[in-house]
Amino acid sequence: MSKSSEEDYRSLPLNSTLALAALVVIIAGMKVGADLLVPLLLAIFIAVVCTAPVQWLNSWGLSRRASVCTTLLVLLTGLLLIGVLAVNSFGTFIETLPDIESRLYEHYWNLLNTMAAHGFAINPDQLGELFNMEEGESWVPKIIGELGNLFMQSGIVGLLVMFMLFETLNFRDKISRALENPAPSLKRFGEFSLTLKRYLAVKTMISLATAVLVWLSCILIGVEFPLLWAVLAFALNFIPNIGSALAAIPPVLLLLIAPDGGVFQALLLASAYLVINFVLGNLIEPRVMGQALGLSTFVAFLSLVVWGWILGPAGMLLSVVLTMTLKIALDSHPQTRWIARLLGPGQRTAKNAKSRDASLPPWQR
């Protein structure tokens, strides 16, 4: 072993310790500043998605500033329209919430009494005290409250998106003036930006298609507040593994206890959710994104736990997006590409690898 190799080997534990200490400090800082980071991260991802229509409009002859203003106007109009409809549906839901909770509580006691009558060793009174359903807070207002806080931050996120889009007009010029040799950095940033925009665009379109299909299913089956459940399905579709199941729980329970509903209608709605998420999430999404833009099941679930612990419920919504952003950033640099491959879904066949590489730019093959 040469002298330089021996020194590198001896410094490996120290470097690993320093890297681990830096990671702990970064995670602690993110957890403390979660209230500031969540709107900022949402704005960054929305701005990245909006750069595609800005570039498309610019290619058709509009100036960059006019393209940004047009994109922001269309985005604001769409969000206001959906927001007004969602707020109206949300207000109606809040008005009927006490009646829904009383019906749910009645079905809960009927279920416990039925199970106790068939020989199960269940005391409804003791189990009711265990869950403390009368005196404790209901889980439904907590979920609605978290969603309400998320919508209340939309104004701040919108302003951040607007300023970020205008800032991107001169971003490459700033990098060129700030660095002595900007070509390698701009190349890596271009790779990262292109792959991230592709991933976010596909994920957003899949989530939007999920929301539309959920809205149609709720209307056809006869569920109350279909737009509210569609918005919920759109948001929770970004959560890996359990997001689709969480989105299906409120409408299925509501249909189960509704006067014109029942077990058959609830099972039909649950089957519709299952088919929608299986087709879009397991068949269409992997084909559109490709294996290179995927995560292993363990990494996806671990990201849900870690980002949810750091950033709260919003971190769970952004868990896959944040982890994919990290994976794409690691994949754009040769020295960290091996970490990105560890986060991936596994070995691809030679045919899939060849077809995927043929569709990429030369610097990403």
Image: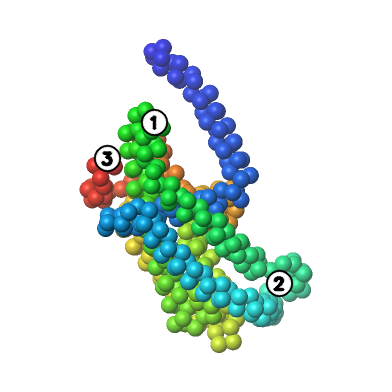
Coordinates of residue 75 in the picture (x, y in percent): 43, 63
- Which numbered disc flags the more N-terminal residue, 1 or 2? 2
Where, quadrant-wise, is the N terminus in this rendering?
top left
- The answer to whether residue 129 is left or right of residue 239 is right
Q: The residue under label 3 is which amino acid type? A: Trp
- Which numbered disc flags the more N-terminal residue, 2 or 3? 2
Where, quadrant-wise, is the C terminus in this rendering?
top left
- Which numbered disc flags the more N-terminal residue, 3 or 1? 1
The alpha-carbon separation of the residues under discs 2 and 3 comes to: 66 Å
Q: The residue under label 1 is which amino acid type? A: Leu
- Tag count: 3
Which dot, 3 or 1, sits closer to the camera?
1
The residue tagged with tag 3: helix, strand or loop?
Answer: helix
* Along the viewing direction, whichever of 236 and 353 lies nearer the viewer: 236
Coordinates of residue 262 in the picture (x, y in percent): 55, 83
At x 48% / y 23%, what residue is drawn? 12
Coordinates of residue 87 in the picture (x, y in percent): 56, 72
* Along the viewing direction, whichever of 30 and 350 lies nearer the viewer: 30
Q: Is residue 190 visible?
A: yes
The alpha-carbon separation of the residues under discs 3 and 1 comes to: 21 Å
Outermost residue toward the top in this view: 3
Label 1 CA crowd tier, 10 Å (few <14, some 14–19, many 20+):
few
Outermost residue toward the bottom in this view: 260
Residue holding disc 1: 179
Q: Tell whether label 3 touches label 2 (CB within 8 Å).
A: no
Q: Which disc is residue 363 wearing? A: 3
Q: The residue under label 2 is which amino acid type? A: Ala
Residue holding disc 2: 121
Query: Is residue 294 shown above or below 339?
Result: below
